[in-house]
Image (cartoon, grey):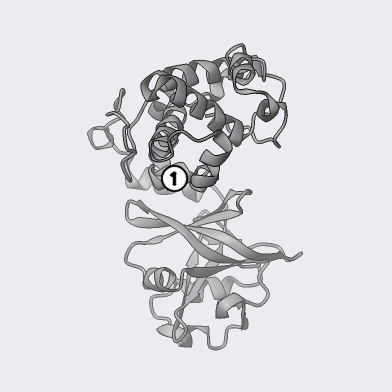
């Protein structure tokens, strides 16, 4: 469905018949059409026509809305279908109630990130998912059919040479951070450059760590981790936390200026920025695990960040 966010406006004040008529005519093209309006549209179609017909009507209506906004390329077929199927499944458990009561009984539908419980980011962001219906790959959506289009078979495609892959990313500068976690007794930290902002609402960050890293069990057990983005005066700190010879456990922080942040999470002094996160979700990523954190605390400074570029720390 469209990713447009807005406050509850005229689209939610109309009666049901006027809402559907306006939606089908592209009448909301110049107005905000918030997530709750999408849910109302899906609910109305499901209760009036059933899930199968609701999918077709919702898809056509959203295409009209997107086109009227001059954003036809933003239409996402799988997201549209998936939300209708989720609304249909919730409706089967809450029959014969009005829309307001329906949302009260199914508050999970208000979460715009709900689809990530059913889809991995790679599948949901794929071109195939945008162009046609792709069935969920993490958890089944009740009542949803098999995929109508096939994802490209990555295994049948020739992979880029490892040397070429590494050379490409060595040409792209990236911030260097120390990921840290504690289980209340021990602590562990490691240097990571695969760290990026993921979302503003909610505030999410992702970091990629090896699937056999000692930090993963700590993050999973405590449900928390910190990120200290190093300054350009902390090259030795980056090398320390990247070294296989560093001490195990909390001893690896000895001699490294730091403090205990939220829930005892290690925060390195002198960092250009730092974040304290709750574990939000994690996803498989080849030989790494993609760890997504919900940011609870954050701060920055004027210190110049340490960058990794062409196998050098700058």
Q: From the image, which quarter does the C terminus lie in?
A: bottom right
Mark 1 falls on what kind of element? Answer: helix
The percent coordinates of residue 10 (x first, y second) are: 72, 26
Residue linked to disc 1: 116
Q: Would you call the spot at circle 1 few (<14 residues within 10 Å), some (14-19), or many (20 or more)?
A: some
In the rendered structure, the answer to whether residue 6 lies left or right of residue 220 reads: right
Q: Who's the residue at 53% across and 65% down the image?
A: 278
Q: Furthest residue to the left?
A: 156
Q: Nearer the viewer, residue 223 or 51?
A: 51
Give the x, y percent position of residue 216: 39, 68
- Residue 265 at x, y percent in the picture: 55, 77
> As displayed, is residue 137 above or below residue 174?
above
Q: Is residue 303 above or below residue 149?
A: below
- Depth check, front residue: 253 or 218: 218
Q: Identify the residue at image location x=61%, y=11%.
A: 25
Nearer the observer, 81 or 48: 48
Q: Is residue 184 above or below residue 50?
A: below
Task: Locate residue 177: give its quadrant.
Answer: bottom right
Q: How many marks?
A: 1
């Amino acid at each position: 469905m469209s990713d447009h966010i807005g406050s509850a406006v005229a689209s939610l004040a109309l009666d049901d018949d006027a809402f559907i008529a306006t939606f089908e005519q592209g009448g909301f093209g110049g107005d905000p059409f918030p997530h709750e309006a999408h849910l109302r549209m899906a609910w109305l179609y499901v209760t009036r026509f059933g899930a199968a017909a609701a999918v077709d009507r919702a898809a056509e209506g959203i295409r009209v809305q997107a086109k009227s906004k001059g954003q036809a390329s933003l239409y996402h077929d799988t997201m549209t279908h998936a939300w209708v199927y989720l609304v249909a499944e919730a409706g089967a458990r809450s029959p014969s109630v009005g829309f307001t009561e329906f949302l009260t009984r199914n508050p999970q539908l208000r979460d715009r990130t709900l689809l990530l419980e059913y889809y991995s980011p790679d599948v949901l962001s794929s071109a195939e998912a945008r162009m046609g219906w792709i069935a969920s790959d993490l958890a089944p959506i009740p009542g949803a059919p098999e995929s109508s289009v096939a994802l490209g078979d990555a295994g049948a495609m020739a992979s880029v040479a490892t040397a070429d892959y590494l050379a490409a990313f060595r040409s792209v500068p990236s911030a260097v951070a120390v990921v840290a976690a504690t289980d209340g007794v021990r602590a562990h930290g490691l240097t990571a450059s695969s760290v990026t902002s993921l979302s503003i609402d909610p505030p999410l960050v992702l970091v990629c760590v090896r699937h056999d890293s000692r930090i993963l069990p700590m993050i999973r057990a405590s449900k928390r981790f910190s990120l200290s983005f190093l300054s350009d005066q902390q090259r030795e700190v980056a090398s320390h936390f990247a070294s296989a010879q560093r001490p195990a456990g909390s001893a690896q922080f000895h001699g490294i200026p730091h403090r205990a942040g939220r829930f005892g999470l290690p925060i390195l002094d002198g960092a250009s920025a730092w974040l304290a996160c709750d574990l939000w979700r994690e996803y498989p990523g080849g030989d790494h695990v993609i760890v997504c954190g919900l940011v609870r605390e954050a701060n920055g400074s004027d210190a110049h960040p340490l960058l990794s570029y062409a196998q050098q720390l700058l």
